Amino acid sequence: MLMMRRRSLLGLLALCASVAFCKPTSEKKERVHHSKDLDERDPNDQNGFQFDHEAFMGREGAKTFDQLTPEESKERLGKIVDRIDHDQDGLVTADELTVWIKRAQNRYIDDNVKKHWNEYDVNGDGQISWEEYRNATYGFHVDEAFSDVSNDEDKASYRKMLRRDVRRFEKADKDGNKVATREEFTAFLHPEEFDYMKPIVVLETIEDIDKDGDGMVDEKEYIGDMYTPEEGEPEPDWVKNEQEQFRQFRDLNKDGKMDREEVERWILPGDYDHAMAEAKHLIHESDKDEDSKLTKQEIVNNWNMFVGSQVTNYGEDLTRKHDEF
């Protein structure tokens, strides 16, 4: 589930602010694509709109349209609809919306890699060596022992981050020459997009959630990754629903824990098309005449569900040329 909170990630990001040049891979993107049914939304996002925005384009992209007035948002969204409507029949189908969402997602990944390429490809040879990445990320003057980091907890966190990056880089580096091509570096930054990186995605997820170190995720750990109880506050109903989800659908062999195979089925289900599911959800919520298609007016009328998503491509579609569309 995209909205699953990585508390360990937040801690590492705070740590990065204290050391120069620190830009760990965890800062680039949520490490995994958690697959959650679209009706199972973040309980902190009651109206569901933030889920739709971020499912399309991520948090930073959603912030772009947060700066626009409703009138500006509707105007831009209306022009985007014309591009989504591939056959120009005045109706947006689930297939057309799915194609647009997938292209937008791929474009986000390409732009993200392009954004960081030059800062890591220091010698400009069109490749990124492990040394280039390590030095740019952890600092030229920080050795592997991180002896210049005074806080022991920070030092342990950096060591853990480095071990993860080494392992992930080696997995992404198909030919094992310690130099990443653009495709390999994309796999390094966005492992959830590559089949051969799945074991790393699963392993990192387990490491983030598994608190007792048994290599599996039990119900308490599963819930604890999403919810921290506050003293004196009643447990929200959605926690009970998640407990039931764990027992019925996550823990398939009913041993009380999720092993690696079960975690993979949870976060990387092969039979679940996120883009199609989101497209159908948006149509369901906006299709007033119930013909399973959307007119421009139906989309604009429900603009606050669409705005801020990758459908609007960070608000840049009106200023960039998209010949591929």
Image (cartoon, rainbow, N blue to C red):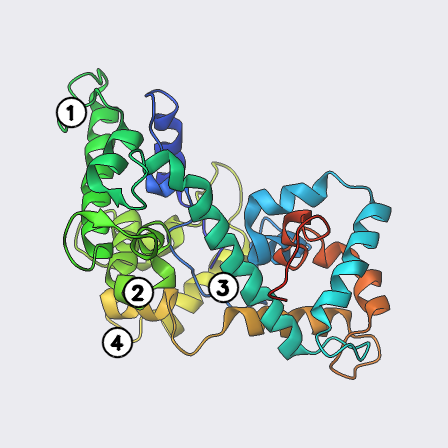
Residue at point 30%, 48% (across, down): 208
Quick check: marks 1 and 3 in contact, CB under 8 Å? no
Image x and y of residue 261, in percent: 25, 70
Quick check: marks 4 and 3 in contact, CB under 8 Å? no
Image x and y of residue 78, in percent: 81, 60
Instruction: Say what secondary structure mark 2 lies in.
Output: helix
- Front-lying residue, 25 or 128: 128
Q: Earlier in the sequence, mark 1 or mark 2?
A: 1
User: Which residue position is annotated with label 3?
Assistant: 241
Mark 1 or 4: the one toward you: 1
Q: Earlier in the sequence, mark 2 or mark 3?
A: 3
User: Which residue position is annotated with label 4?
Assistant: 253
- Front-lying residue, 152 or 143: 143
Q: CA distance from mark 1 to mark 2?
A: 34 Å
Residue 258 visible in the picture: no
Q: Earlier in the sequence, mark 1 or mark 3?
A: 1
User: Which residue position is annotated with label 2?
Assistant: 263
User: Which residue position is annotated with label 1?
Assistant: 143
Q: Eyeballing the image, is 121 above or below 263?
A: above
Residue at point 19%, 16% (across, down): 148
Q: CA distance from mark 2 to mark 3?
A: 18 Å
Residue 24 visible in the picture: yes
How many neighbours does mark 3 have within 10 angstroms: few (below 14), some (14-19), or many (20 or more)? few
Q: Is residue 315 left or right of residue 291?
A: left
Mark 2 or 4: the one toward you: 2
- Front-lying residue, 97 or 322: 322
Residue at point 47%, 53% (across, down): 110
Q: Eyeballing the image, is 175 above or below 131?
A: below
